[in-house]
Image (spheres, rainbow, N blue to C red):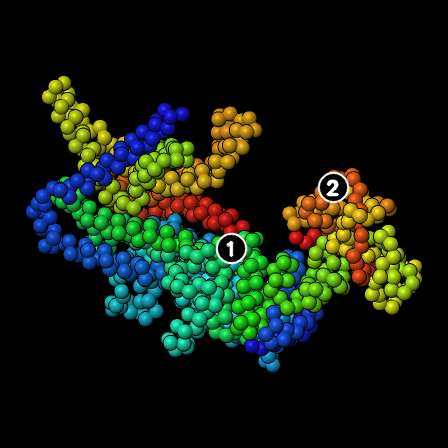
Amino acid sequence: MKKYLNLWSILTIATALLLTVPLWVLVSFVFEPTNETWAHLVDTLLPEYIFNSLWLMLGVSIGTLLLGIPSAWFISQYDFFGKKVLQWALLLPLAMPAYIIAYTYTGLLEFEGPVQSFLRTLFETQTVNLWFPEVRSVGGAIIMFSLVLYPYVYLLARTAFSNQSHSVMHASRTLGAGPYKTFFKVALPIARPAIIAGLTLALMETLADFGTVQHFGIATFTTGIYRTWTAFGDTTTTAQLSVLLLVFVTILMMVEFWSRRQAKYFTGSNQAAQAMPTKLSGIKSAMAFSICLLPILFGFILPSLQLLDWSINVAETNLNMEFLKLVWNSFSLAFITALVTVSIALMLSYAKRSQKNRTVDSAVRLSALGYAIPGTVIAVAVIIPFAWFDNTLDAWARETLNISTGLLLSGTLFALVFAYCFRFLSVALQSLNSGFSQIKPSMDESAKTLGASNWTILRRIHTPLLKSSLLTAFILVFVEVLKELPTTLILRPFNFNTLSVKAYEMAADERLADAGLPALLIVITGLIPVIILSKMIGNRNA
Amino acid sequence: MRELQIKQIKTTHQNTTIIDNISVHLKAGEIGCLLGPSGCGKTTLLRSIAGLQKLTEGEIYLGDQLVSSNQFHLAIEKRKVGMVFQDYALFPHMNIADNIRFGIEHQSRKQQQDRIHQLLELVNLAGKERRYPHELSGGQQQRVALARALAAKPQILLMDEPFSGLDVELRESLARQVRCILKTEGITALMVTHNQNEAFAIADSVGVMKDGELLQWDTPYNLYHQPNYPFIADFIGQGVLIKGSICGCRQVHTELGVLNTQLAEDHATGEKVSVLVRPDDIIHSDKSSWQLEVVSRVFRGSHFLFTLKLPNDEQVMCMSQSHHDHAVGSKIGIKLEMDHAVVFPLQNLKKVKAHCCTSV
């Protein structure tokens, strides 16, 4: 028994260390002296990176709260026309990566686009230039991010609102507080930790974004890292810039951690005290309906229609062998990554369950760090040690064996899968951990007292109970890989294209319509996890 | 403090009647309690008074102010009722002082501080002002909820199963404390519970509810000794019903012999009835020559509870002191200690069997 325990512990710790090697290498660059590229950056662009990132974070905070909280409040407290559909449809924008919605709105709002053309027809001014707000701006990016990231706030706020014991709100009323005071002094403050946790997730995504800000020409950390890496090839400065971004991310992670802990005290324990939602009718029902429809309309329906329109227009020319190759590349890469990631997650999560010791717990938590780290940073972090390894091995081989080993790790699919695996491991881990948490230790014990062997327990009890969690984990990772842009862009092997990279390249060449087909396929695949998510929530409420 | 008057109220939910034709009158300063099994509508009645539930028929008055009727519904926050919820509903993001302050924020700072201080003294939680709800025990949270509800000196205090979340040992002592606090403050109060010990510990008068109807509103003593319905006889205290027949004036013949009873006049001689026999009506006495066979026995610590078999196979219960143990199958001596037997017409018997809710 003792030996068994050690094996598991060693395996978990080894996995955690191996996965995080790139991160430690990256952080070690903090101790390197800064060079002239860094000095140049500090003088010119760095203030802009910081300033833009802060602006984006502030704007996205306001945007996601404004879209997420009212809809969550109406869905959790009231019954109105269309609520059944709206409550899960509000999650749909999660299927829309920020860079894709940015492409669609660029198309919709540009000079030749349908909106401006319509306005010109309306005012019969074919020649005169109407003033129109520029979508490719910090403000535009804030709106794009808010439209696709508000579901994080909505989801956590809704759960918090509906878990609040109704008697707390009734207590406030019997103590003389009207509905407004009750909302602002009782309901909202109680949900605050959950809302902040949702907000930090949205902000982490904002910081991690590369596609949108690159397309809008906004200088932020991610575009800066990409530029420093590709244009200057300066490893030290790239790494140092990445670490600076990680400081921001770490602060957000700490806020999230603190909020979640706080939220535990704030959620009501008595489920029975939940009253029926109040029925709205007439104008009030219409208002609630509109408030919940708006984010879906602008965050999903309109951009999807634009993608559909582009796809239909170019289908004849673009639906060819090249596109099929693209689909094959993307799907097989996503499939392999999901398989590897879920296997590692299964091992870690089983170790965590069977070994109840803190070392294993910490190792698992360490392995899950990737979710917070922007894809650009992970790509850079992976390529630095991998390239060093390849170069060193190659040099050694040339010297002693007189052969060139070439690129073994960097510039191959291995690097890509490794980076994805680190980035998305926590997605799989969360799903599996919740699956394992349903299998209480007493189930194993009761099965054993009933005469079942370990093998029987695994086959008859664990496997059926874990099946759906495994599938969910697989699908979530699969779709994340499909959507991921910057990691793929930096780490992909030469001439290896995926759907997301294709969409990015077409958009960068101002061929937005040609980006439509790959983007649409990404969004459609992205719908699967959204449906799973809304089903899981539905089951929990039932 | 105001009196509470409920006049023939009815509430419905999706065309189902929840409570029907209920009238209650609670005098200023009186503590009332609604007792009944779960689903009997007692909480709905409480929520109607608080304004959390609208009326289909009837009227509710607080003092001489109409607060609810089928046409009028005074907003919850304007009723000045204090309510203690089953889960206490303390605001988790506010400390104890701020929780109590919530209802009296319109008062001056000095008044608020004085009232908070006074209430915390009253509920024996002085010095806990800065604590948060999750840092307190269940019993302490319960007392904070009480203090918060009392802060604004409500016209009436409503309590919904206030002790159900607590350990059984705590409940009765806390109920006695709460009664003491309410009497000190002179509060009119109405509590809902399904536990008769709590009800008896706290209330001046108790109403027993079943299936949305109020069966009897009386003192605890009368509910036990003069239940109007077999259901109440069964719900409150222990006891069995045995067969009897009316024999002459205020007397009923049973297997236990001829018993005195207070009868309504419409019982004819020879009419079959059922007679309530409580365990404390039959006393075990070793000297008695009246011997019955022990069918089963339960040790209750302070006493033994024997089930005895009558000659016609009917069974009755009998209490004895805790050191008087007798084996099952043996015969023990008994004597009757019964002033007036409670008699029910036979046709009601079905109601008893159908709702055999054994009380604790």
Q: Is residue B202 left or right of residue A336?
A: right
Given the image, what chain letter belongs to the residue carrying mark 2? Answer: B
Say the numbered circle drawn on residue A270: 1
Query: What residue appears at the point 48 percent right and 47 percent down from the top-left corner?
Result: A535
Q: Nearer the viewer, residue A317 or A107?
A: A107
Q: Quadrant of residue A110?
A: bottom left
Query: What residue appears at the point 14 percent right and 18 percent down from the top-left corner?
Result: A401
Extreme left residue here?
Answer: A36
**Up-down: is B167 above or below B108?**
above
Residue B304 is situated, as x and y percent measured from the top left of the image, at 70, 47
Q: Quadrant of the N terminus of chain B?
A: bottom right
Disc 1 residue type? Asn
Label 2 sits on residue? B326
Q: How many marks on residues? A: 2
**Up-down: is A486 above or below B167?**
above
Q: Is residue A270 left or right of residue B110?
A: right
Given the image, what chain letter belongs to the residue carrying mark 1? Answer: A
Q: Quadrant of residue B174?
A: bottom right
Query: Would residue A210 be seen by someone viewing this image from the given angle?
Result: yes
Q: Determine the secondary structure under disc 2.
A: loop
Query: What residue appears at the point 45 percent right and 40 percent down from the top-left corner?
Result: A437
Residue B148 is situated, as x and y percent measured from the top left of the image, at 47, 67
Q: Determine the secondary structure under disc 1.
A: loop
